[in-house]
Image (cartoon, helix red, strand yellow):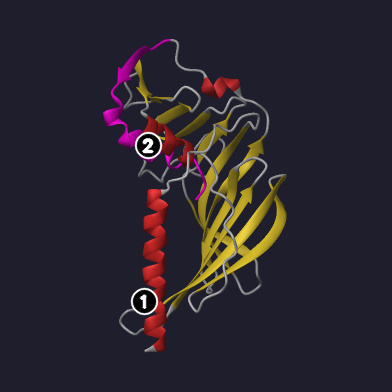
């Protein structure tokens, strides 16, 4: 009974905090300038054996992501979001995709452009959205690393650990691990999950996220082949296509695409 009361009190406190947070939404982050980079974003599943050596069990589709010195954001991925059977050229072991979807987002002017290449694309045009204030704020959040969380006191269900710093792809990253015990509502065996986030505070990007369990199965997403050089060619809009301006009322699909830019 004491545990139930404690849980209910925590739930009420959590709901109250959520209401306060909704009433006091923080301002969107500013455009991240003077920190250009380009990288390959990957997702793969890994098994950690008894010898502590990782073995890749599945390599999924990659995408290229970038940011320039003015804060513009670039990404390209397969034209089919559900297609995990192809890849970027010269990356991984999957065949090269036939179709590509390209997005450029400029937070300083509040505009986003997209176009495609390949068999399913209309090669005569590219699309521009002028974002309203709410859409612009959301896209800034989608392309900015969230703050490193504060280490909270442990509870019976959740324990957090500051993993300190280590170098990932030549960048200093700060790691936070969260271990969560998920109780089975039917009375079965509780499930333990491990969630790690490694963030480059200097570059304002997430470098790696690991979701695993005690059996050694992990899903790892991150950035590799990182270059800190400015890559202006990635951000050039098409000069051989007709610009088509579309109402921001139709922007939700592009927002969902842009949500994949940040490692999470």
* Left or right relative to 104: residue 12: left
Q: Which residue is mark 2?
A: 255
Q: Which residue is mark 1?
A: 8
* Left or right relative to 2: residue 162: right
Picture quadrant of residue 19:
bottom left
Picture quadrant of residue 176:
bottom right
Residue at 40%, 55% in the rendered image: 20
Q: Nearer the viewer, residue 119 or 258?
A: 258
* Left or right relative to 31: residue 259: left
Magenta segment boundaries in residue numbering = 240-264
Q: Nearer the viewer, residue 57 or 20?
A: 20
Mark 1 to mark 2 CA distance (whole Å) = 36 Å
Q: Nearer the viewer, residue 59 or 207?
A: 207
Residue at 53%, 27% in the rendered image: 72
Above or below: residue 215 compared with residue 105: below
Callout 1 touching callout 2 (CB < 8 Å): no
Q: Secondary structure at mark 2?
A: helix
Find residue 50 and report its horizontal and vertical position in percent. 62, 75
Q: Quadrant of the N terminus?
A: bottom left
Q: Earlier in the sequence, mark 1 or mark 2?
A: 1
């Amino acid at each position: 009974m004491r545990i139930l009361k404690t849980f209910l009190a925590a739930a009420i406190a959590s709901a109250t905090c959520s209401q306060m947070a909704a009433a006091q939404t923080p301002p969107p982050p500013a455009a991240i300038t003077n920190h250009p980079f380009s990288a390959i974003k990957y997702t793969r599943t890994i098994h950690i054996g008894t010898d502590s050596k990782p073995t890749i069990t599945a390599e999924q589709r990659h995408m290229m992501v970038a940011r320039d010195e003015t804060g513009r954001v670039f990404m390209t991925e397969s034209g089919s979001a559900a297609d995990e059977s192809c890849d970027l050229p010269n990356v991984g072991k999957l065949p090269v995709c036939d179709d590509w979807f390209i997005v450029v987002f400029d937070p300083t002017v509040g505009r986003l452009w997209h176009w495609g290449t390949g068999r399913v694309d209309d090669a005569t045009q590219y699309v521009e959205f002028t974002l309203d204030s709410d859409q612009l704020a959301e896209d800034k959040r989608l392309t900015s690393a969230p703050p490193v969380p504060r280490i909270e006191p442990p509870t019976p269900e959740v324990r957090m650990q500051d993993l300190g710093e280590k170098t990932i792809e030549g960048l200093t990253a700060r790691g936070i691990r969260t271990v969560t015990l998920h109780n089975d509502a039917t009375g079965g065996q509780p499930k333990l999950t491990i969630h790690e986030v490694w963030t480059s505070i200097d570059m304002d990007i997430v470098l790696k996220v690991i979701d695993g369990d005690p059996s050694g199965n992990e899903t790892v997403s991150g950035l590799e082949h990182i270059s800190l050089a400015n890559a202006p060619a990635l951000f050039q809009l098409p000069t051989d296509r007709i610009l088509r301006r579309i109402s921001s009322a139709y922007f939700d699909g592009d927002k969902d695409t842009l949500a994949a830019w940040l490692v999470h």
